[in-house]
Image: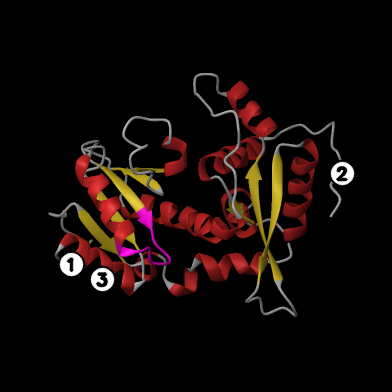
Amino acid sequence: MKIKVEKRVSLTPRDIFLLNELYENMVLSFSQVCRKAFLGNAKSTVLNRLGKLEGMGVIERWRVPVLDSKKPGPGIFVVFSIMRKGIAILQARQPELAFRQKPVRLHGYTVHHDVLLVDVMDVLRKKFPGASVVNGRLLTDQAGAKAVNPDAVLHLADGKERWAVELELTPKSEKRYREIVLRYRLQSAFARVLYVTDAQEVVRKLARVLDREPERLGTNHPAEKFLVLSLNELLPPQNCSKNQHLKGINA
């Protein structure tokens, strides 16, 4: 689809809010954009506004093939990211903050993981009232984050603990888990490491590496450093990101 170049579009507070969300989350699906910034608006209204923002060169639309689409042939999973011009606008409006200048590069093979991570982060904020959750790729230049590069970082409300969050959709090799666990054990940047997964092979490999079952996150304060939380428990199937976001196919 050819994007019409827009030169005379005034950014609204909602546009700035959306740019901040795209910056903080790296990528948003069409349904996430609707939920976060256009709740209650018609799809045509959302698409029209997104088209204008694309025409301004502040956001970019990505189309990722979906082979298991129910539509005839492969569908297209539509996601949005912020562009360099959008980041410059945020920096000009919030000079007291330090924004990276370049957008994070997206990869088609990880985009579904990245989109699902947005929902995981949103639900963790609700599960831990008062806590903040930051995408791990925003912290790659900060002390302690280089050693492990978690998917997200959870800062508890009391300020006493900082947790690494790892969203595991498919298992890594046991050798890789040994390397990751060792790196987490050798540095003190994170008090806990929370693995969010429904892949039992991930849990089994972690158990072999840790020499015991990783602790299941419950209502009590955890005693172990390495924890596991069910993805389906965190995001029930009826609200699962994958099903919701695929409704935006071919948007």
Q: Is residue 59 magenta?
A: no
Given contact means CB atoms under 8 Å apart, are the residues at marks 3 and 2 in contact?
no
Residue 213: assigned label: 1
Mark 2 neighbour class, 10 Å CA radius: few under 14, some 14 to 19, many 20 or more? few
* On-image quarter of the N terminus: bottom right
Residue for point 62% across, 38% down:
19
Q: What residue type is labelled 3?
A: Arg
Please provide percent x and percent y for residue 246: 62, 68
Bounds of the magenta span? 166-174
Given contact means CB atoms under 8 Å apart, are the residues at marks 2 and 1 in contact?
no
Q: What residue type is labelled 1?
A: Glu
Q: Which amino acid does label 2 sit on?
A: Lys
Asked if residue 107 is positioned above or below residue 54 in the image, the reply reads below
Nearer to us of marks 3 and 2 is 3
Q: Quadrant of residue 103?
A: top right
Residue for point 42% across, 36% down:
139
Q: Name the residue under label 2.
A: 4
Asked if residue 77 is positioned above or below residue 47 in the image, the reply reads below
Local secondary structure at mark 1: loop
